[in-house]
Amino acid sequence: MKLPFRGLIAPVFTPFNNDEKNSINFNVLPEYVKYLSAENINGILVNGTSGEGMSLTVEERKLLCDAWLRASLPETHVMVQVGGLPLPYVLELAEHAEKAGAHSLLCLPDLYNKPNNNEELIEYLKLVSKAAPNTPLLYYHIPMFTNVNIDMGKFLNDRVNEVPTFAGIKFTSNDLKEGIEAVNAKNKEFAVFLGADMLMAESYALGFDSSIATTLNIFPTLGVNIKKFHNENKFELVEENQSRLSNNVTTITKYGGWVSSMKSAMNLFTRINCGPVRAPIVPVPQRLMNILRNDVERAAEKRQ
């Protein structure tokens, strides 16, 4: 099954209220979508890693799927991550997302009964596909979290077409040799979204055409410019914007884990307040927030 969307997708943060349960703040979503659209980001990924999908209940993930779809604009492509839970819940979420009108699905592998080879992963994805038979399905390759180290180039050249709705992968790895083999698999049949913010320029030079990148939430202009200037063969500007983006990432992630530091940066540098992270993710200590802001701003001033 072909995925019609190509380009840039922001893996949206889940806004939480600063209350005892860190309840979901649904009121933020319409403004969040408008903010991304104004920055030329017309794709969103719901309940992914940055969205703290693994810290949400099944019901919360359904509610978020529905709420993001209601908030989306006509041009917004809404991809929903349904994996990372026991299989019955994964199938329930896939079925729900299709009925709700999601444009595509993304699915982690089983995180306990991990697939050990192409065949086991294909059989798993067949089950997910059957639960949502009319919606393009992508596999979420993020081995640093899942410890599922199946080679994506070889996987996409295998029997993956036996999964009726299979459309591609999100490739969150620094191994661009493997990544470009995935891009070129079966005459570039599949959508392959890079998930490594600091490698956008290099990946586009090799042949990638799409990204799902957390920094598209925080510094969308830089991500858009990297893609735009690459398409225009303005390679000095590509490198300039990639360098600025990579320096920002390096600076921000000194202050905490990926999700907590990036969500803190979202709150500091955009008009969208996504609130705190939810346990078990450890937040950036409040005493470091102003230091983080000043560090990023000083680095930006030095580059001017």
Image: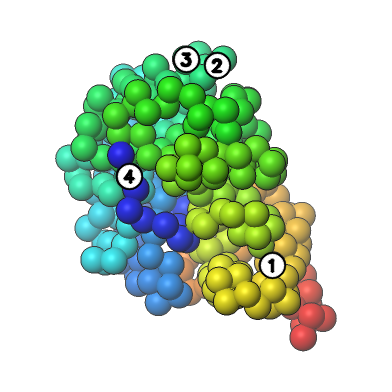
Q: Is residue 144 left or right of residue 60?
A: right
**Considering only order in the chain, which callout, 1 or 2, is on the residue closer to the N terminus?**
2
- Which residue position holds label 4? 2
Secondary structure beneath dot 2 equals loop
Residue located beneath label 3 in the image: 120
Left or right: 131 in relation to 87: left
**Quarter of the image containing the N terminus?**
top left
Give the CA distance from mark 2 to mark 3: 6 Å
For the point 59% across and 54% down, which residue is it? 207
Q: CA distance from mark 3 to mark 1?
A: 37 Å
Q: Residues within 10 Å of mark 1 (few under 14, many from 20)?
A: many
Outermost residue on the bottom side: it is 304
The answer, for residue 290, to whether it is visible in the render is no
Q: Is residue 72 left or right of residue 182?
A: left
From this viewpoint, which residue is outermost toward the front? Answer: 187
Residue lying at 54% horizontally and 35% vertically, measured from the top left: 141
- The amino acid beneath tag 3 is Glu
Label 2 or label 1, whichever lies nearer to me, is: 2
Of pointers 4 and 3, the one earlier in the residue sequence: 4
Q: Nearer the viewer, residue 260 or 223?
A: 223
Residue nearest the observer in this picture, 223 or 229: 229
Q: Are marks 3 and 1 in contact (CB under 8 Å)?
A: no
Q: Are marks 2 and 3 in contact (CB under 8 Å)?
A: yes
* Tag 2: amino acid: Asn
Q: What whole-number distance in Å separates the C-alpha atoms at marks 2 and 1?
A: 35 Å
Mark positioned earlier in the residue sequence (1 or 4): 4
The C terminus lies in which quarter of the figure? bottom right
Judged by depth in the image, the label closer to the viewer, 4 or 3, is: 4
Residues at marks 4 and 3 touching, judged by CB atoms closer than 8 Å: no
Give the residue displayed 61% in from the left and 63% down from the top.
265
Residue behind mark 1: 242
User: What residue is disc 2 on?
Assistant: 117
